[in-house]
């Protein structure tokens, strides 16, 4: 069974998508995140689903038979709120998240109103570690990493 609901690439260009946001601050923050994540991953941004901007991919296949491809790092910009995705979960970064600045976090999401509210070097460190953690799985992830033991 292939899961397409959360991991479908979109053919709209990232530039067109950012231009459509109609929010200058979110567009500026998006450009900063794109530059950061492209530097970390070495990959150009791709649009996934309705508005997630992702970098690089990994394949997952769970014991249940569910499998698919997903972005390794990415974010979803919306007016007044940016969601940063850590596909290996936020729990393993609790120490760094405590130093990040104004944000909230759930299983694999960090919610930020604007980049000016956080410490960018800390976010970059978190993203770098998350990217390296997933890449170390050799492209064969067999468990939901953000629910896995840390």
Image (cartoon, rainbow, N blue to C red):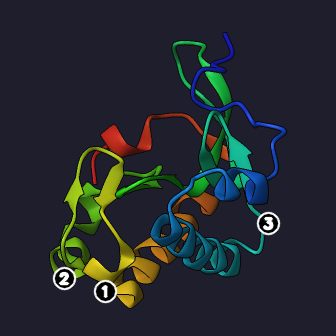
Q: Which numbered mark, 2 or 1, is in the foreground of this view?
A: 1
Residue in front for this viewpoint, 139 or 23: 23
Disc marking residue 146: none
Q: Image point 35% across, 50% down: which residue?
A: 109
**Structural crowding at the residue carrying mark 1, measured as other residues with C-alpha within 10 Å and reported as few (<14), some (14–19) or many (≥20):** some
Tell me whether circle 2 and circle 1 mark residues in contact (CB < 8 Å).
Answer: yes
Where disc 2 sits, the SS reads: helix
Q: Which is nearer the N-term, disc 2 or disc 1?
A: 2
Question: What residue is shown with label 3?
Answer: 44
How far apart are the alpha carbons under marks 1 and 3?
Answer: 24 Å
Q: Say if residue 44 shows up in the picture.
A: yes
In the displayed image of the protein, which residue is found farthest to the bottom? Answer: 121
In the rendered image, the vertical position of residue 132 relative to residue 64, given as above or below: below
How far apart are the alpha carbons under marks 2 and 1?
Answer: 8 Å
Question: What residue is shown with label 1?
Answer: 119
Question: What residue is shown with label 2?
Answer: 99
Where disc 1 sits, the SS reads: loop
How far apart are the alpha carbons under marks 2 and 3?
Answer: 28 Å
Query: Which x, y percent locates residue 103?
Result: 22, 65
Query: Which x, y percent locates residue 73?
Result: 56, 58
Where disc 3 sits, the SS reads: loop
Q: Which is nearer the N-term, disc 1 or disc 3?
A: 3
Quarter holding the N terminus is: top right
Q: Image point 68% across, 40% down: which residue?
A: 48
Q: Which is nearer the N-term, disc 2 or disc 3?
A: 3
């Amino acid at each position: 069974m292939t899961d397409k609901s959360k991991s479908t690439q979109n053919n709209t260009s990232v530039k067109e998508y950012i231009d459509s946001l109609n929010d200058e601050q979110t567009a500026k923050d998006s450009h900063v995140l794109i530059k950061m994540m492209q530097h970390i991953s070495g990959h150009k941004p791709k649009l996934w689903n309705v508005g997630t901007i992702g970098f690089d991919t990994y394949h997952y296949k769970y014991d249940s038979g569910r499998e698919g491809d997903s972005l390794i790092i990415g974010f979803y910009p919306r007016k007044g709120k940016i969601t940063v995705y850590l596909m290996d979960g936020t729990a393993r970064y609790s120490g760094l998240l405590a130093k990040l600045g104004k944000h909230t976090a759930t299983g694999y999401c960090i919610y930020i109103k604007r980049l000016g509210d956080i410490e960018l070097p800390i976010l970059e460190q978190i993203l770098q570690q998350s990217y390296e953690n997933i890449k170390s799985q050799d492209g064969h992830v067999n468990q939901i990493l953000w629910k896995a033991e840390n």
